[in-house]
Amino acid sequence: MDELARTDPLTVAERWKGEGRPVAIATVIETWGSAPRPVGSHLVVDAEGNFHGSVSGGCVEGAVITEALDIIGSGSPRILEFGVADETAWRVGLSCGGRIRVFVERLD
Amino acid sequence: MRLDHLKILNAARAERRAIALVSDLTDGTDRLFTERDTVEGALGEALRAAFLSGKSAAVDADGRSLFINVHVPPPRIVVIGAVHISQSLAVMATLAGFDLTIIDPRTAFATPERFADVNLIAEWPSDALKDCPLDAFTALVAVTHDPKIDDMPLSEALKTGCFYVGALGSRKTHAKRLERLGAEGFSQGQLARISAPIGLDIGAATPAEIAVAILAEIIQSLRRRALDRSTAA
């Protein structure tokens, strides 16, 4: 398996689903200010909480995965909104101060 | 997201074809569009902008809250000729975000010493293009002005619908080139897609300036390309 097939979130999502694993796909749909990942970025999650890709620099992935597990169960898509200001950003003198909106849906 | 849509989307990405998935953020339904689909109204406008810029965006259209996730292949430049202009073009094109490959069978020109950190293939284009085929998101720049080397990739670029096809050479050289390609069966319209003299007319005088003119013309062709034009010649 090449690097793309191993780590590209949408390729991983297709493969997981093909293996019979339930999958949720999270997508960054809007950003304000300096957000770490561009619009269109994906995080894919299976029912066990395994994931690939990212929607932020690691700040909000935990929360997105928790919501994704919920959505795998319910099947209803949801829009999540996060502020991405964190103390690390302040410490290096950059107030990140960004916000992102993330769309989470089940792959059916 | 529908699994069948994801499969089509992944196949298009793997084959370097542009595609957009439009998700309805309220009910989670999705639709797929290619560059050649005709879409009316606000969604059509937003799709065109997304395909041209390569940027995904949320959009409100027809009273629905939608998200367009556009997947445009990373643009490539294939240069035929490891000449002085190509040395400058390789540096500038990389800075502008293009993947660049240089092909030249003349091993005196195609040396790693002249082209450090450049993807350089010292083979005939007919061999090199087997491993690195041209497509609609590739620009072909032919700068050897040797018909033995330039003609085959130029003809291939027209057949595969490269978004930019440019050839270096005087008007006289180009007139002869058009005669040869015309004899291969290309129409006047197809041949008119070859940009010659190559590059935007900015009075470029040095190899580096010519590289600027070529790169500017490539960017113009990429960002202003006609989306409804058939990509195959």
Image: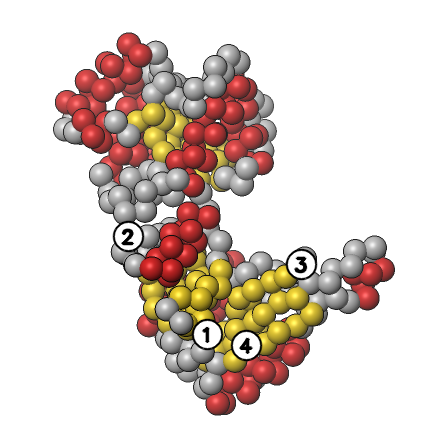
Tell which subunit mark 2 falls on.
Answer: B
Q: Which residue is mark 4?
A: A79
Q: Which residue is mark 2?
A: B36
Q: Tags 1 and 4 in contact by the CB under 8 Å rule?
A: yes
Residue B5 seen in the figure: yes
* Callout 4: SS: strand
Instruction: Please give left or right for residue A49 compared with residue B125 in the image.
Output: right
Tell which subunit mark 4 falls on.
Answer: A
Pinpoint residue A12: horizontal percent, then vertical percent. 48, 69
Instruction: Name the residue located 31 percent from the left edge and 12 percent from the top edge.
Output: B171
Type of amino acid under label 3: Gly
Asked if marks 3 and 2 fall on the same chain, the answer is no
Asked if marks 3 and 4 fall on the same chain, the answer is yes
Instruction: Name the residue located 48 percent from the left edge and 90 percent from the top edge.
Output: A74
Pinpoint residue B182: horizontal percent, then vertical percent. 17, 23
Type of amino acid under label 1: Leu
Report which quarter residue B153 is drawn in. top left
Q: Residues within 10 Å of mark 1 (few under 14, many from 20)?
A: many
Q: Which quadrant would the N terminus of chain B be assigned to in this image? A: bottom left
Type of amino acid under label 4: Ile
Q: Residues within 10 Å of mark 4 (few under 14, many from 20)?
A: some
Q: Which residue is mark 3?
A: A33
Q: Is residue B74 above or below residue B129?
A: below
C-alpha separation, residue under disc 1 versus residue under disc 3: 22 Å
Tell which subunit mark 1 falls on.
Answer: B
Q: Which residue is mark 1?
A: B25
Q: What's the mark number on residue B175? A: none
